[in-house]
Image (cartoon, coloured by chain):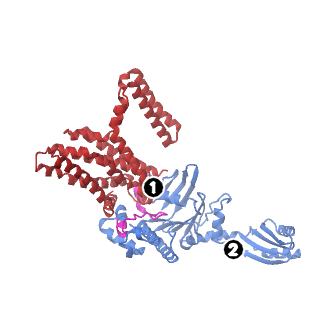
Amino acid sequence: MIEVKNLTKVYGNHIAVDHVSFTIDPGKIYGFLGPNGAGKTTTMNIITGCLAATEGTVTVDGHDIFEEPIQAKKIIGYLPEMPPLYMDMTVKDYLRFVAEAKGVAGKQIEAEVARVMKKTAVTDMRLRLIKNLSKGYRQRVGLAQAILGDPKVIILDEPTVGLDPQQLIEIRDLIRELGHDHTVMLSSHIMQEISAVCDMILIISNGKLVAEDTPENLEQLAQHEQTMKLTVHAGEAKTKKIVGTLGAAVEIRGMKAISDNETELEIGILTEEDVREKLFYAFAEAKCAIVSMVREKQSLEDVFLSLTRVDAPEAKPASAADKGGVA
Amino acid sequence: MTAIFKRELKSYFTGMMGYIFIAFVLLFIGIYTSALNLKYAYPGFEYVISSSAFMFLITVPVLTMRVFAEERKQSTDQLLYSLPISVMDMVLGKYLAMVVLLTIPMAITALYPLLIGTFGTVSYATAYSSLFAFYLLGCALIAIGMFMSSITENQIIAAVMCLGTLILCYLMTALSQLITSTSLASTLSLMVVALLVSLVVRLMTKSWTAAGFTAVVTFVPLGLLYLISPTVMEGAFTSALSALAIFDRMDSFTGGIFDLTGLVYFISVAALFCFFTVQAVEKRRWS
């Protein structure tokens, strides 16, 4: 549906988006995740034709956004970060203007405006001036504007910012509903939000795409790497020695002496095998007691954090073999 | 384009802007009409036109300052960029809405010569050709103001830049007479302008090569022309400046001449600045 190739955007000497490539398949909800300033908004602005790329191409349903902008933009509905609303218009007038500009046929404008107002629950506000609406309602009017004209692709830039919990649930439900017959791409810097509604997750950091996978696969990726927290009755040097006997599969990530004879340590386990038993016997042989041992399961959040760490090791696009296995 | 045009035109009348603009234009022309035509009983409406042209110095910046600057400030320009309409349609839609807004008081003013005609002999041809030129002058100035609004996101800056430009155009003839028209002075003044143009090129392209090229291309012919035949350069700067005196193009119309070059001039200025606006709006996407 959307094909992004080698997209690069340079502002002065700052690289906002750095050779990003991905494909968006029809009929799925894509989550675009990254910390603030990672390049999410820039990428979305380029896809929707609001911004020109320094390098690379974006093709929407076969139409290049730079070569055939009109055809490409007809397929896209876009809600930017700040809902682009004319404050001195009523909700209905505003939506009618957008419908006209999107080329909705004259007779269908009324029905289409009524449909999107109902869908985003702003019908009661239709005669109010937009400047008198609350943040949540403005966000919804922005969303209504994006889904007007039933575009095949809907792109939402941080659609849930500033909403109260109730509205959050409503908007999420609405996005899920839209996902049934549209391709949806939404951005966020909150992992839970993305994993709650998306079929596919794209993680971007410092302008680079660092992961592209289903939430399930990313979660599996997380489990490959387990960490353990232990408290043992042994000195630091001794602890180090004992852990060292277990080989390269185990590495010490952090160590803190609580007293002469008690150490807290965090270890990373690089294999999938369960090393808890080995650890127990290793310490038992040295006559050191393990007083606590906790295995920490990594969550999606941790994957996100580790992938987007500023000093993250050279990012490898963690694309699973069965790309798009979950629909 | 029609969607933008309709929205813009409607927005003038949902707020106060449209009404104030129309009222102000009518008030101004009304004052001159009652003074010249009614009190002093001049039969010619063209005097009113030529006296009230400077009203555009105030009304045009106020009308045009918000047209693009506000969109940027409110970030509604993102909506316009993402809609399936070309930048050209966007600019023309907005421009035509302002032109239509100007048409309303002009249409009302068009009744004045008829009214005056009931009490005496009025040269309708002169009156209406002056009014027509006046209208075209307004359209050209609106295009200039629109361009100023498209290069900033601050309405006040847009208004001040527009006002400055219009005042400069208004006073251009008087200003150009301050400069001595000897051959050397003309050549040097033109060279200073060429230098300024090169600096602007440098600022816009960030390339010294392009700036240097512009400087050489402009300096060499000027210098050669001065060396070969100094008489050609006599008064060249003054006439170059008076070509910018857009308000003075009205004079032949109010003097009773239907000046085709004047019409072409007004329409060219309007088209040129619409084109510049398209480029300025388009450029924003590339920044």
Q: Give A275 or A255, whichever is nearer the viewer.
A: A255
The residue nearer to you, when weighing B57 against A215, is: B57
Residues at discs 2 and 1 in contact (Cβ within 8 Å):
no
Image coordinates for residue A77, horizontal then vertical, percent: 43, 64
Magenta span covers which residues? A69-96
Question: What kind of residue is marked 1?
Answer: Ile
| Type of the residue with mark 2 | Lys
As for residue B9 lying within the magenta part, the answer is no
Q: As drawn, is A94 to the left or to the right of A164?
A: left
Q: Residue at x 87, y 69 (%)?
A: A238
User: Can you tell which mark lies on residue A65?
Assistant: 1
Which element type, helix, strand or loop, lies under badge 1?
loop
Q: Name chain B's colour.
A: red
The crowd level at tag 2 (other Cα within 10 Å; few <14, some 14-19, many 20+) is some
Instruction: Using the image as rendered, state which of residue A39 and residue B36 is in the foreground.
Output: B36
Q: Position of residue A190 (x, y in %)?
A: 58, 69
Reading the image, the residue beneath label 2 is A297
**Residue B226's x, y, as percent?**
41, 24
Is residue A81 located in the magenta-colored stretch of the structure?
Answer: yes
